[in-house]
Image (spheres, rainbow, N blue to C red):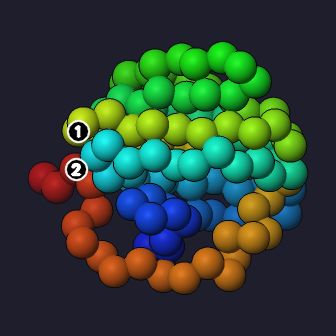
């Protein structure tokens, strides 16, 4: 799967279905994914690192195994921890906007870890 640049400091590898998309998102240390919103409901699991999630007036800090949900069209932002993070994320409907985002320079995939 190609590595795509979703935001500065955020790369994703995505599989698109007819009604949903699933992604592995790799986030660099200490970055802020600025407040944004989209038509997709978003579910995720932190599989590496930590991050603070803000949505609907609520802030939650999550580490490995933590789960999150952003409702469709609700503004949200993410502050990544000092060690960076990796998330598995599902979006419904499919992230049509991600079908045209630019490829990223491969600076070393964090997940899965090298053996």
Q: Is residue 99 above or below residue 114?
A: below
Q: Residue furthest left?
A: 115
Q: Mark yes or no: residue 111 visible.
A: no
Residue 77, percent from left and from top = 60, 39
Q: Looking at the rendering, which quadrant does residue 64 occupy?
A: top left
Q: Is residue 79 above or below residue 68?
A: below
Q: Which residue is under mark 2?
A: 113
**Does the residue at mark 2 contact the one at mark 1 (Cβ under 8 Å)?**
no
In screen coordinates, is 55 left or right of 33?
right
Disc sitting over residue 6 in the figure = none
Q: Looking at the rendering, which quadrant does residue 107 occupy?
A: bottom left
Q: CA distance from mark 2 to mark 1?
A: 14 Å
Q: Residues within 10 Å of mark 2 (few under 14, many from 20)?
A: few
Residue plotted at (44% across, 21% down): 62
Q: Secondary structure at mark 1?
A: strand
Q: Looking at the rendering, which quadrant does residue 94 occupy?
A: bottom right
Q: Earlier in the sequence, mark 2 or mark 1?
A: 1
In screen coordinates, is 89 left or right of 17?
left
In screen coordinates, is 63 left or right of 54?
left
Residue 28, percent from left and from top = 32, 52
Q: Is residue 72 above or below residue 50?
A: below
Residue plotted at (85% across, 63% down): 18
Q: Residues within 10 Å of mark 1 (few under 14, many from 20)?
A: few
Question: Given this view, does label 2 or label 1 mark the residue nearer the observer?
Answer: 1
The residue closer to the viewer here, 38 or 40, is 38
Q: Which residue is under mark 1?
A: 83
In screen coordinates, is 109 left or right of 80?
left
Residue 112, percent from left and from top = 30, 51
Residue 20, percent from left and from top = 78, 54
Q: Is residue 70 above or below residue 90?
A: above
């Amino acid at each position: 799967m190609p590595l795509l640049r979703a935001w500065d400091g955020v790369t994703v590898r995505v599989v698109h279905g007819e009604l949903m998309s699933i992604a592995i998102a790799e986030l660099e240390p200490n970055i802020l994914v600025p407040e944004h919103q989209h038509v997709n409901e978003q579910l995720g699991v932190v599989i590496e690192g930590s991050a603070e999630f803000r949505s609907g007036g609520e802030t939650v800090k999550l580490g490995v195994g933590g789960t999150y949900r952003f409702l469709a069209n609700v503004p949200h932002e993410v502050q990544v921890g000092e060690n960076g993070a990796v998330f598995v994320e599902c979006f419904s409907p499919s992230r049509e906007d991600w079908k045209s985002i630019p490829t990223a320079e491969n600076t070393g995939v964090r997940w899965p870890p090298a053996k």
